Image: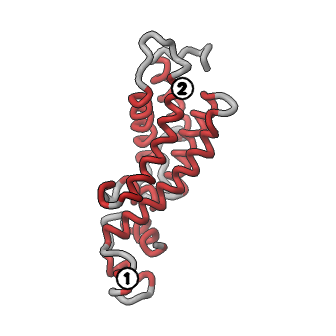
Amino acid sequence: MRAALELIAQKGPAGFTFADAARWAGVSPAAPYRHFRGRDELLADVARRGFEQFTLALAKAWDDGRPDVMAAFDRLGRSYLDFAKREPSYYSAMFEAGVSLDTDPQLRTASEAAFAVLRAAAEKLVALMPAKGRPPALMVALHVWSMTHGIASLFARGDAARRALPMPPEELLEAAVLIYLRGLGLDSAAR
């Protein structure tokens, strides 16, 4: 596992072989086959572990919307960006390795648990909006996830894929989410 994380950091999720991971770990090329059927299964396990850590970080930041939904929602976004910065190898395995969630039921479950935190937050956020014209919480969750993921992938990473930005990524995300929420009718009184 440590070998895969290090190799992802150095070469990206597609830049190493199963034999490279065995060599880095100091074991025979056949040894990893005792635990994994191949490189994709190893990457799926790395991604699953990443999603489990990601879910814990998101849930802690969200804290069931305490002390208020808007403050908790802001923490949730910052936590997402922080994870991409602190754990770029896990982040790459989770979102860039090309491992299908259908290859491993545990990977799918871990991925869905992370999204469930965001969806629960979106449900509480949508409840603050005017009832007339209120958008579906799932749509809001998907839009906010897309914005957050884009900013994390482009500007908040802790690896060589990070691009320069003339402001902190957290400020960019905060502005994007505020503009989005205003467009949906969440006024300053609700905040």
Quarter of the image with the C terminus is: top right
| Residue 164 visible, this orientation | no
What is the number of the mark on residue 34? 1
Going by the numbered disc 1, the residue's amino acid type is: Arg
Residue 80 lies, with reference to residue 74, above or below; the image says below
Mark 1 or 2: in front is 1
Residue at (42, 43) in percent of width and height: 149
In percent of width and height, residue 187 lies at 55, 14
Nearer to us in this view, 150 or 105 = 105
Distance, label 1 to label 2, CA atoms, is 47 Å
- Give the SS element for disc 1: helix
Expressed as whole percent of the image width and height from the top left, the position of residue 61 reads 61, 43
Mark 2 highlights which residue?
125
* Residue 46 placement: quadrant: bottom left
Q: Residue 59: horizontal and vertical position, in percent?
A: 58, 45
Say how many tags the image has.
Answer: 2
> In the current view of this chain or complex, which residue is farthest to the top?
132
Secondary element at image label 2: helix
